[in-house]
Amino acid sequence: MLPTASPRLRLRVSPVAQAALRKGHPWLYSDAIREQNREGKLGELAVVYDRNDRFLAAGLFEPESPIRVRLLHSGKPVQIDNEWWERRLRSTTERRADLFNSLTTGFRWINGESDGWPGLVLDRFGSTLVLKIYTGIWLPRLPEILRLITGQLQPERIVIRLSRNLQAMALGQFALSDGQVLFGPPLEGPVVFQETGIYFEADVLRGQKTGFFLDQRENRRIVETLSAGREVLNAFSFSGGFSLYAARGGACAVSDLDISRHALESSERNFKLNQEDARVTACHHELVQADAFEWLKNERERKFDLVVLDPPSLAKRELEREGAIRAYGALAVAGMERLRAGGILLACSCSAHVSIEEFYAVIRRAAEKSGRVFSEQRTAGHAQDHPATFAEAQYLKAIYLRF
């Protein structure tokens, strides 16, 4: 891929960076580079050596990024050629081979660095694949990547989604736009897929992330087992994923609470997709358009038997971490106040800058301060198709409390 007549890009790095690379960390920062034999091009292969001129790692170079090299391989030298890329994709997809049956046609094929594809995500929604790119290193390599994916996975179509910071460069230098269909027939609206036998739509062209939050599948399955006979509040409901699982689990009523009318309309359509299920039809489905923080604080008369709190990331930068921790605590307090005796609270966080320990601690403190007797039922993290192999990748956490 990307053949070049220039000599191989060679880097030497600081002792601290050497140690991190040997332990398998997938990023090499620009300030750790001590020697570089020439200017590097976007997406080209860079080889990293230690101070004794021994091979350390190889990765893709991004000249304008603080993360200067995103690693593909470390340890013993290998030849990174077309066959190597074929093997990498095959091994990545084979790890998912036994995770899902025919009732689940929406899942993650590739989860970035944790699968050896730094800054690249590939999600499946039925016969449509969504390729999400978070770093410019993949843009010049896109034709090769498309050939790999179409050859091995044989999708009907592939849609590209671009991180916001890449969109101007992608359009100007590579004629790529967010939501563009790169392969296969055009697409005018959402695609429909199954998750554990429940039908959902995914807005793969314009929706958040890749169009649906596949990472909460396991928690949705748990909520289904807890919902029989209960009245459920799904705060920050998005397109109603938790709500449909609760309905299928026998909930008598589900309330979707979201500030976005678009999200609530998507939830309503998802319920209509599943009307052949008598349990879904029997469940009263309420849509509430409001700011979830304000509604939880002000609607003091409303009580529920199960409250799901799954807000968007409250700390997108390290500077926002302390404020996010306080916000999670306040949100948990408000959610607990909406619970009847015997009720269950599910509190989730997708903020990578808030650690697992910090999140669980603030939820437990809120429960202790409530003065109510409670028990911690379980905690949960990443699903198997969303592995997190290094600290910065660990974002998803959930805790279940019964009052």
Image (tube, rainbow, N blue to C red):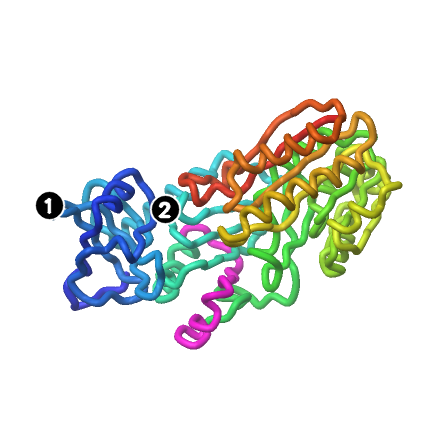
Magenta residue check for 173 = yes
Q: CA distance from mark 1 to mark 2?
A: 26 Å
Q: Nearer the viewer, residue 170 or 273?
A: 170
**Mark 1 secondary-structure assignment:** loop
Percent x, y of residue 356:
53, 36
Q: Residue furthest bottom?
A: 172
Q: Quadrant of the C terminus?
A: top right
For the residue pair 40 and 76, the one nearer the viewer reads as 40
Disc 1 target residue: 52
Where in the figure is residue 72, as x and y percent of width and height? 31, 49
Query: Which numbered marker is on residue 116?
Result: 2
Q: Which residue does the image show at 59% across and 47% down from the upper left?
A: 324
Residue placed furthest toward the right: 301
Does residue 105 show up?
no
Mark 2 residue element: loop
Q: Identify the amino acid type marked 2.
A: Gly
Camera-side residue of 149 and 4: 4
* Residue at x-position 63% and y-position 44%: 326
The picture places residue 332, in percent across and down from the top left corner, at 69, 39
Left or right of 396? Residue 293 is right
Q: Which residues are magenta?
A: 152-175
Residue depicted at 58% across the width and 33% down the height = 360
Q: Residues within 10 Å of mark 2 (few under 14, many from 20)?
A: some
